[in-house]
Image (cartoon, helix red, strand yellow):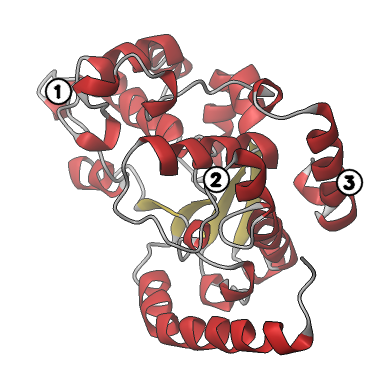
Amino acid sequence: MKQTLKTLLPELIINKIRKRKRRPIYQELVKNLPDNVIVSYPKCGRTWLRLIINHAFYFEYPELFGGNPKEYIDTLLRLNEKSKTFPKLQMTHDGRPMYYHYRELFRDKKLYKEKKVLFLVREPKDTLISWYFHLTQRGTSLKKKEFDLTSIENFIMGHYGGLKTIIRFYNDWIKAKNQCKDFKIVKYEDMRNHPIDSVKEILSFFNVKDISLSSIAKSVEFNDFSKMKQKEKENFYGTNAIGVSSDKQDNNDAYKVRKGKVGGYKDYLSDSTIDSIDKIIKNSLNHEVGY
């Protein structure tokens, strides 16, 4: 149903108040980030990339891990703690846009002006399908009543964490790229198709020169999606962050490592829905993102 000005105004006021309350927290978060950051919307391959970088470092310097590949690195800052040759590097969702109305995003990125930013992106339809299943299957305590989770289509077309939110997030970062000290886009699909070259390129962007191609290749093999899923099932890392509850092990959509499939949205969306979404993407998403 199309909103009238009368029904829209209260929502606009609510969006403005929420954003104002969150602003000091957001500013503090960005200020505390190191000079090297990987920014992404959720479900763009961040966990996979973090594990590959972590284990590439492990295979290069196993003695720093006590020879234990099970050590779970929840933040890449820990690699700098293990060896000062590795830069202070951190991943962020930049204010957690996936939980908010598209009008509540922080659009000005001037706080990143001294930072080197790698922007990790993924096809919006695949990203939102994965985020929908995270919300509905993984029992997150951060579900918001504003989400319309009655169907995948309603969620994607909703104002909270849906298509409008991810498009605005992507567009804002492309617009702000020149505000950063350095900026690079990496597509999830390129990582899936050419993981070794992509990871080497990412490490080079952050001036990491001492991780060999051999160690990267071993890490890519170690973190193959089928192997990661089995590790999750076995609770290999001993953390709920990469784990599935025992009562949901037969439910593929309840895993943190769900599919990682390029174009997997075709398994869930009708052709007419895909066409509608693609028209919005074509008309609204900055072409530099690449989708």
Tell me the residue that label 3 is attached to: 279
Circle nearer the N terminus (2, 1): 1
Image spot of residue 152 (x, y percent)? 61, 39
Q: Answer with the quarter of the image where residue 106 lies.
A: bottom right
The amino acid marked with disc number 1 is Glu
Identified by mark 3, the residue type is Lys
Extreme front residue here? 1
Q: Residue furthest left?
A: 66
- Vertical arrangement, residue 280 with respect to residue 265, above or below: below
Pinpoint residue 222: horizontal percent, then vertical percent. 36, 12
In depth, the one of 164 and 117 nearer the eye is 164
Residue named by callout 2: 150
Residue at numbered disc 1 = 63
State the SS at label 2.
Answer: loop
Disc 2 versus disc 1: nearer the observer = 2
- Is residue 130 rendered to the left or right of residue 246? right
Q: Quadrant of residue 214?
A: top left
Residue type at mark 2? Thr
Report if residue 36 is visible in the image: yes
> Is residue 21 left or right of 172 when viewed as pictured?
left
Give the mark toward the camera: 2 or 3: 2
Quadrant where the image shows the C terminus: top right
Q: Residues within 10 Å of mark 2 (few under 14, many from 20)?
A: few
